[in-house]
Image (spheres, rainbow, N blue to C red):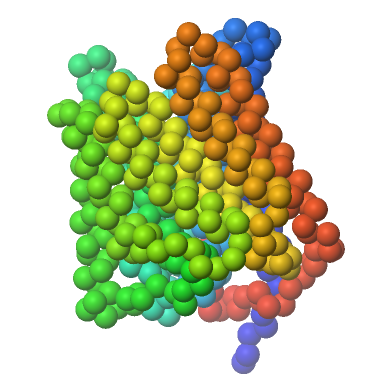
Amino acid sequence: MKSTPTVVPVFRREPYRLLFPLGVLLAWSGVLHWLLLAAGLIQEYRSIFHAFAQIEGFMTCFAVGFLFTLIPRRTGTAPPAAWQVAVAMAAPVAVTIFAWFEKWALSQIPWLILLAMLIQFAISRFRSPGAGPRIPNSFVWVILALVMGVGGSVLAGVGASLGEEMVWLHEIGRGLVLQGMFTALVLGIGGMLLPVITRGAPGPAGSGRSIGARNGKLLHLIAGLAFIGTFFIEVLVSVRLGFALRAAIVLATLLASAELWRLPTVPGLHRRLIWIAAWCLPVGYACVAAFPQYPKAGLHVVFIGCFALLAFCISVHVVLSHGGAPAPLNESPWPVALMGALLVSALVLRVLVNLDPGHVYRWLGLAAACFLTATLVWALFLLSSLRGPVKAVDTRFAVDKRAAPAS
């Protein structure tokens, strides 16, 4: 007897509709206090909270929203279940709230729950019958990213609880969470997405279960393990050597899987910004290797120049292409140019925080203002572009319950 397709609700079919706006709200929670501090309205310098809110809040919402949308469509499997979307929304908020009240250990409980759910979600889709041929080799990095998120959190917690003698373990764990996880996501997704978005490539070659595909996945796994090793080298041997190796591995991976040396050929300003953002990843790590006395300056080339710029530009691509308003994607809208300029300005100003310590609050406040304004420009541009009514039901995404379980 033929099964009846089940219509999937919009919030499951396109979870980015919920997670992208939530990510921006959490970005405001992580950055607004810098602006208030610079204006003299508050006196607390909350650098640790800022890192938690930006990485485990803002960036995590964008990453999960994208993975929840991409993986089911790439593998031809079911979208996330309602409870998984609920966890994806609740966990970053809980992390941010606990971090504000400096409950660092408690903040990692929802973080680990979220990552455990993501690992189960990704593996179940990747192992689904028929999914293998659609999975690019670079997606090895996606699994490694989630492992780094879990392992880094555990190492940071264990290192903090064992006293000063084991603080090195805490530092390695923090590095894996704050840098490693999202770098791996960029490498894993970028290997597939960058050629498609920037050059209109047909899709990644070498996916599937052939000998070439297995060798490709093995090479990515070896590179990923070497990348993880750089965090141990950074803390235990040499900061300069650790970051130099990290930059080299990231650059080699992007050149091999995304052919990053090729200029964008498809029209569209956001595509060029995505290409620039990808280059900022190895460049930022190389800056720390060259100038280890200014590590935060180099790392913000990664955080703002790569992570934030990629998040906003790829989200523009996702929202407009899925929302039935793709025309601006092949143009150079002034809001996209303004958003890019504001993020670049935020990056330069944030670097000045470390290069000009005599005027820390001035540069910090201006950087925060530029970043927050960029989020407003992003939101207003998308809202103005999506003028048509949203359909409550879209039968193109009907799911057969028997073939694809919801969880």
Place residue 101 in its image quadrant. Answer: top right
Place residue 291 in its image quadrant. Answer: top left
In this view, the residue in front, 119 or 285, is 285
What residue is shown at x 72% (from left), y 39% (from top)? 376
Drawn side of residue 374 relative to residue 243, left or right = right
Place residue 368 in its image quadrant. Answer: top right
Rendering coords of residue 189 (x, y %): 43, 59
Rendering coords of residue 331 (x, y %): 67, 62
What residue is shown at x 28% (from left), y 74% (from top)? 213
- One can see residue 324 in this view: yes
What residue is shown at x 50% (from left), y 30% (from top)? 348
In this view, the residue in front, 67 or 287, is 287
Drawn side of residue 210 relative to residue 300, left or right = left
Rendering coords of residue 156 (x, y %): 33, 29
Query: How many numbered circles does the render carry?
Result: 0
What residue is shown at x 42% (from left), y 19% (from top)? 355
Quarter in which the N terminus is drawn? bottom right
Drawn side of residue 252 relative to residue 335, left or right = left
- One can see residue 146 in this view: no
**Farthest residue toward the left?**
237
Q: Is residue 355 above or below residue 60?
A: above
In this view, the residue in front, 355 or 44, is 355
In this view, the residue in front, 170 or 357, is 357
Q: Is residue 64 above or below residue 25?
A: below
Rendering coords of residue 38 (x, y %): 62, 14
